[in-house]
Structures are given as C-alpha cells and as structure tokens.
Image: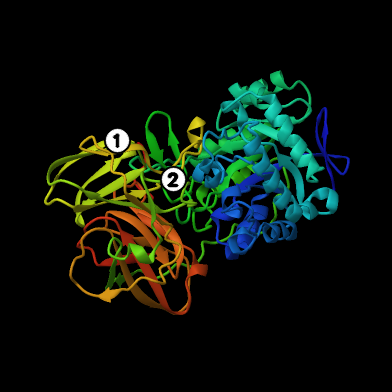
Amino acid sequence: MPQLEIAEDGFRLDDRPFRIISGGLHYFRVHPEQWADRLHKARLLGLNTVETYVAWNLHAPRPGEFRLDAGLDLPRFLDLAAAEGLHVLLRPGPYICAEWEGGGLPSWLLAEDGIELRSRDPRFLRAVDDYLSALMAAVKPYLSTSGGPIIAVQLENEYGAYGEDSGYLTDLAELLHAHGVDVPLFTCDQPTDLARGGLDGVLRTVNFGSRAEAGLAELRRIQPTGPLMCSEFWIGWFDRWGATHVTRDPADAATELDKLLATGASVNIYMFHGGTNFGFTNGANDKGTYRPTVTSYDYDSLLDEAGDPTPKYEAFREVIARYASVPAEPVPAPGRKLAPRTIDLTERAGLLDQAYALGRAVLSDHPLTMEQLGQSFGFVLYETTLPLAGPTVLRTDAVRDRAQVFVDGQPVGVLERENHEHALAFAVPRRGAHLAVLVENQGRVNYGTGIHDRKGLLGRVTVNDEEPTDWDSRPLPLDTFDALTFTATAQPLVGPVFHRGTFELGRPADGYLALGGWTKGQVWINGFPLGRYWSRGPQTTLYVPAPVLRPGPNEITVLELHATAARTVELCDRPDLGPTQD
C-alpha cells in the first residue's frame, strides 16, 4: 500500500500530492453486519478515507482483558474498508471524547483512588501501555507500512482543551512507536487550543464547523509549514435529554465544506455516519450541570441512523465532485423498513423482587461505588434497614446520576444529579423498614476534568444525620436476564419492572421502536441492547437494526423504571428524534 508523507507543502501519497477527503464512521456505533454497507456509501460519496475512534472501554471491559469479537472486530472493519479502496485514519485515544461513555476510558481506572486520567500518572500510563500493546498486536498488520489501509494515527484527542503537559504527549507518542506505529502521527484541537494540544514533530490539525478560513489561518500561524487539515469538520451536533434535536441546514454545511476544500486543505467530515449509542454507552457533559447524551448519535450526518443517505449526503457529494473524482454510480436508495405494528408486552418481572437474580450484593459499612464493585454500566441497588419510624431525611454527598428511593418496596422519591439534588424527605411507616436506593449510571462525563466520574452514591450517606453502617451494594449490569422469572399478568407491579413480549416477522428489516405512554428505561430485542428511552425527549423512538431481528418469533424486553399503564410498544418505519430549534 502507498505511504502517507508529510511534506512542507501538503500530504503526499506514493510521492504524489494527496488530499485526504475523509468521513467519520465509528465501528462500535454500527452493527457489524452493516459495516460493509456504510463503507460502500462512503466510497460512493467520493471519500478516499474513513476515520474511526477506538473505544478502549469496550475492548477492555476488565484489566488484562482485550476483546476483538463481534462488534469489536476492528480487524474485520479494516479489511472491509480496504476492500472498498478506502484509507483509514485511526484514532486510538486513549481518550476519545466522542460523546461516548467516559470518553472511551475504562471505568476500572477509577477504582484507583486519586488516579489522574490523561496525565503522566504512572498508574494511568501503565494501563495505556497494556492497552496499546494489545491493540497494536491486532492492528499493526493494517498499517500502510505493512500493506494495510491505516495511513495515519491520531495522538490523544483535543488535548489542548484539557491540559498542556507536552511530557504526557511525548510519553504517548513513545508508547505508540514502541508498539509498532510507524505511520505519521497527528493531533487535533480547536483553533484556540492548537498551541497547548500539539507536540513538536507531530502534525497538528484543527477542528471546527464553520469559519473555515479563520480556523485554517490559525493552524497556519501555529504551524507555518506542512499540510492543512480539518480533522473534525462538524456538520451537525449531538443531542441531550431534555433539549431539542440539533440539525444543520444541508446548504449551509455544504457551502462551508466548499470554502474549506477551496483552500486546498484536507478534511474529515464529522460525522459521515453517526450511528447509535447502543445499550448504556452514551456519554455526558458537565460544565456545572450534568447533561447526559441521548441514545441516538444521528448527529444530523450524511447517513441517518439507519444508514440512509440524507439531503446533506447529496449536497456534499456535489461539492466533493468539484475537487475530486466521485464514482458515477447513483446515490443509494433508502433501505427497506418494517411495516408498522403494535406489540403486546404480556409478561412481567419486578426488578426489586428479583434483584438477587441480576447481581450479587456486597456487604460493607458504606455504599460502594460502581467502580469499586468492578462494574462499568447499568445500575447499583443499595439496601439497608431504617432504625426508626416517622419523618426521615436521606442525604448523600453526591448522586451519580439518578437515584430512585423505595421504602418497603414503595417509591418515595427521586434524586437527580442533573437537578443538583442531595436530600429527600419521606415518612417511614415502621421501625426496621427496608430502604432501597436504585442508582442509574446515566453516562460518564466524556469532556473536561469531569471525566473522573465515579458512579453510585458517593461520599457520606446519612439517614436523619446518622450514617447507616450495614449496606448491601448490588451491581446490576443488566447484561443477561436468564435468571429472571416472568409471569403473565395484567396486574400492575410496583417499582421498576421488566415487561416482555414476542412478535413474529417474515423478513427482517430496519425499523424504529416508539414507546408512547412509557416514562424512562431501557429496551432489548433478542438480547441486543437498543438503548435508553426517556419521555422528556427529544428522542422518542429507538433505532432497531435489521441484523438484530430474525425470521419467526422475536423477543422484546422493556425495563420501565416507573409505574405505567402502558402495555404495548410500536414498531414503526420512521424515526422521531424530536422537535428542532426554530
């Protein structure tokens, strides 16, 4: 394969001038059976390259473990990219941001008290060393120097917005080289962070979504020679729960792309295809107030969540054709969708009643964090005994992130991090009543110093100013329901409840699941985690990838966290990502 060179006047490939025209496509946000389709559409757009992050936290769910199976089969993704004739920009972090849980950093790092992430902390660097060793053992054959599609590798990610320790970046560069990376390295930062986030001898690139000339001018000021590149050309944005769905006019975005390409610069379109934060993998932001990101990562990108070309795809294809060769094939048509139908959920299983089947409790004199329990995603159930009847106030130093409180199985209130809530008053009916606090990890912060985001009940927890000293902390990762006992009943169950039903299909296709009348929870189809839903919106449907369905019977499980009269869900043929801003 040809080698990428960084010359004073631009990129060169095989000793010829080369412009990178790339698009973001994160393999871990797309069902693996759909990778080939998305990569093919990237080539038809006129891209010569795709960019992907690597999600360390998924590949290494526990220390000493490194997974490359199923949707984490990065070598297979790279093979498919090469089969389409696409180069690859690999962004292994270790920190990736990406609106992804914890910015891609494994939660088990936070089991170490006082660890400083994204720093020269020896504990962090040892873990990074192990990660890069395992990753590069799988990826090194895919570097262009070994005949593969990877032409460049990113060093860290927007580090200038976080710190300015060039020694840390030097350590990471040395680790990458030590583990066999012999293609060019590059950094990326927003214009105001370029000086802090770069490293001498490593190509700097810039991120922006508008004012291309100004952003590139600042890059040229900081880096007088070498290629000009926008590594994240933001063409949309992500959504958060409780806000509106963010969109960007296709004509406006295409005009800005035209201005960017007219300068001769290279570009990575963020995102070409956003995909989905399946399961519990969404991130969050906290700049004084905690704001979790929604399940959809549609990002108003060129392909929608189901991989169908949008008007923005066609507008960008027209612009790219002015500067590069675009395949003569027509724009792909939208894929087939499921016919709308109603699904009855007829079986129930109470979460509190059967928590013993979902995780083993750990006894301690204080509530343990999710990280101390060796858990990354899901919920923790804390239980203790209340010594006295009467008016009671539960206080905690910090709720991370949403706590539902129950006394003798009855709900008495909710504490939300987003609302800065720390105390809840309620009445206890009897001495020795049972207190249960179900805490949801709504997504670890993925940006800023808030990435040190431990989950559960943090610090002191008091009941009427006294600290209980006999707590059960039960991890509930909800990665299997095999031990649950479901019963067919129309009777409402108190507290969080699993609802289950089946539906028949002839030929699977993409679809969307609408949950009108439901409040908040999680959905699985045939054991595959579609993600979170929340009636506060903006998103009101969940994307259902065709590969998770099968001909014949299919099973759907909904965990509803609150009381509901809803007994049905709707499969539909179009998404509803919510109202947009005027």
Query: Residue 419, which numbered label?
Result: 1
- Where is residue 443? Give x, y as percent: 44, 45
- Where is residue 195? Give x, y as percent: 66, 21
**Label 2 neighbourhood size at 10 Å, few (<14), some (14-19), many (20+)?**
many
Residue at position x 47%, y 79% from top?
A: 551
Pick whichever, 70 or 12, lies toward us: 70
In the rendered view, does 7 fall on the left or right side of 32? right
Query: Residue 376, which numbered label?
Result: none
**Label 1 neighbourhood size at 10 Å, few (<14), some (14-19), many (20+)?**
few
- Where is residue 33? Give x, y as percent: 59, 65
Whether label 1 touches label 2, CB < 8 Å: no
Residue at position x 74%, y 50% from top?
A: 136
Earlier along the polypeptide chain: callout 1 or callout 2? Answer: 1
Q: Say if 24 sits above or below 568 in the image.
A: above
As shown in the figure, which amino acid type bears the numbered disc 1?
Answer: Asn
Pick whichever, 341 or 516, lies toward us: 516
The coloring applied to the image is rainbow
As shown in the figure, which amino acid type bears the numbered disc 2?
Answer: Gly
Pick whichever, 517 or 463, lies toward us: 463
Quadrant placement of the C terminus:
top left
Q: Say if 285 sits above or below 381 in the image.
A: above
Pick whichever, 95 or 536, lies toward us: 95
Query: Residue 443, which numbered label?
Result: 2
In the rendered view, does 558 fall on the left or right side of 284? left
The local secondary structure at tag 2 comes to loop
Is any part of residue 523 visible from this angle? Answer: yes
Q: Say if 547 sits above or below 362 in the image.
A: below
Is any part of residue 576 visible from this angle? Answer: no
The local secondary structure at tag 1 comes to helix
In the rendered view, does 206 fall on the left or right side of 224? left
